[in-house]
Image (cartoon, rainbow, N blue to C red):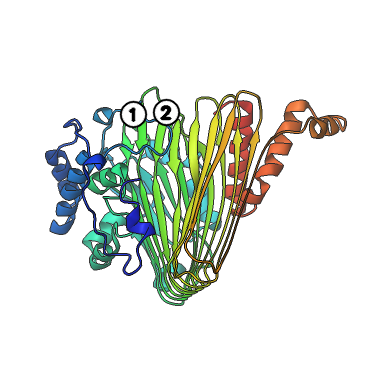
Amino acid sequence: MAAKKNIVDINTSLYDFKYEEKPEDFMKVSEGLTPEIVCQISEEKHDPAWMREFRLKSLDIYKKLRTPSWGPSIAGLNMDDIVTYVRSKSKMQNSWDDVPDDIKNTFERLGIPEAERKSLAGVGAQYDSELVYHNVRDEVARQGVVYTDMETALNGEYGEMVHEYFMKLVPPTDHKFAALHGAVWSGGSFVYVPKGVKVDIPLQSYFRLNAQGAGQFEHTLIIVDEGADLHFIEGCSAPKYYVANLHAGCVELFVKKGARLRYSTIENWSKNMYNLNTKRALVEEDGKMEWVSGSFGSHISYLYPMTILKGDRSHCEFTGITFAGKGQNLDTGAKVVQIGKDTSAMISTKSISKDGGISTYRSSVNVNKEAKGAKAFVSCQSLMLDSISRSDTVPAMTVKTDDADIGHEAKIGRISDDAVFYLMSRGISEDEARAMIVSGFANPVSKELPLEYAVEMNNLIHLEMEGTM
């Protein structure tokens, strides 16, 4: 990954990114995305001058950087064919009744309004390139919690805060699609939780990419101040088309001293989607970052959430599952950089592959020499449901101090014929028996989700098992 050193080898400030251009990092690309297009997006979004300049600089970097080579080939993705901005016919609404019927019907089929009424503190719904609905419960707003769309935050009273944090954890120089995101980002969520505030019920954003041949480039920026606590849920989906769609969003999470953030994701992209998403968290002293991730759908995925444990005694946990079916190559994992003293990390992932699907797990644990007393444990388990599927584990560990306790274990296997036979002997069909075993395999992830989302994840697993997704 280009400029990976900007995160891993920083010993002083995590915000002073210095990028040295090297000839091998660059290539000539077509002129499909132009400064005029970027300026048009900037004008549509009413960007301040600094953001327009940022977009144009990102475009310049995008045109020079090579396509990432660390995951499966994305040769089938032609960026000249991807529409980078799709204007919604609806302005953002605060009342669900005011959302146009066709958009509203799409989200109602996904259960978004119902979930909001039952269990959520606030909901944002993005359709293609723009937020079409946003609402926060009064009792949460009275706590001083800010939950709004990125454009409103950028152009309103939180503009200086956006300027301070925007793409500081994921700079455009990080890799080619981070630069693309910096140039054409649109929509997304901004959350600020004040000091000491504990949000008892989750906030949620849901992203629907509905346009054929389009890209979605939402930006999520969450700042959980000292001693605060938040659970944020992200859902993603798209219909199936026979041309490539692209998702290149960006998530930046800042967990301050003694704060806690849980970030849960259920991604159910269609199998024409190239999911090239970047997620990163920075955790201060005594802070805690928790990731819960379910990755389904998409043709190809690059998804490796990173946690930077900057503060002493900071901690992170990552719990994830992927399901790769026919025609899917899901390259996923997690990264941890341990900088502070007595930091700790726990990574537990599960992957399932079926009908020739390819599942690759990549982990990276990087312990800096200052990270005395660091602890990290990585566990990855893979389940292959037939003889034509594939599962690979690619762990990487760099430990620069002797005062650390780091471990890794991996297990790859198939469904036990004895287990299937036992269940069948109890009157269960073979297909149901296999589905039960897979659901049990996924249970450690689903139990970390709120009930409604655990049910959704289990339904997605059953659909994958039936081959109907």
User: In the rendering, at what x and y percent does residue 18 appear?
Assistant: 24, 58
Q: How many labels does the image show?
A: 2
Give the structural element (helix, strand or loop) at label 1.
loop
Kindly identify the residue that appears in the image at 27 percent across and 67 percent down: 161
Density class for disc 2 (Cα within 10 Å; few <14, some 14-19, many ≥20) is many
Query: Which of the 4 quarters of the picture holds residue 275?
Result: top left
In this view of the protein, which residue sits in the foreground, 179 or 123? Answer: 179
Q: Residue furthest right?
A: 425
Identify the mark at residue 272; answer none if there is no mark: 2
Question: Label 1: which residue?
Answer: 77
User: In the rendering, at what x and y percent does residue 76 appear?
Assistant: 36, 25
Tell me the kind of residue under disc 1: Leu
Kindly identify the residue that appears in the image at 46 percent across and 74 percent down: 285
User: In the rendering, at what x and y percent does residue 176 appear?
Assistant: 29, 42
Kindly identify the residue that appears in the image at 28 percent across and 59 percent down: 166
Q: Is residue 116 above or below residue 212?
A: below
N-terminal of the pair, mark 1 or mark 2, is 1
Q: Is residue 16 visible?
A: yes
Density class for disc 1 (Cα within 10 Å; few <14, some 14-19, many ≥20) is some
Which quadrant is the N terminus positioned in? top left
Which quadrant is the C terminus positioned in? top right
In this view of the protein, which residue sits in the foreground, 195 or 119? Answer: 195
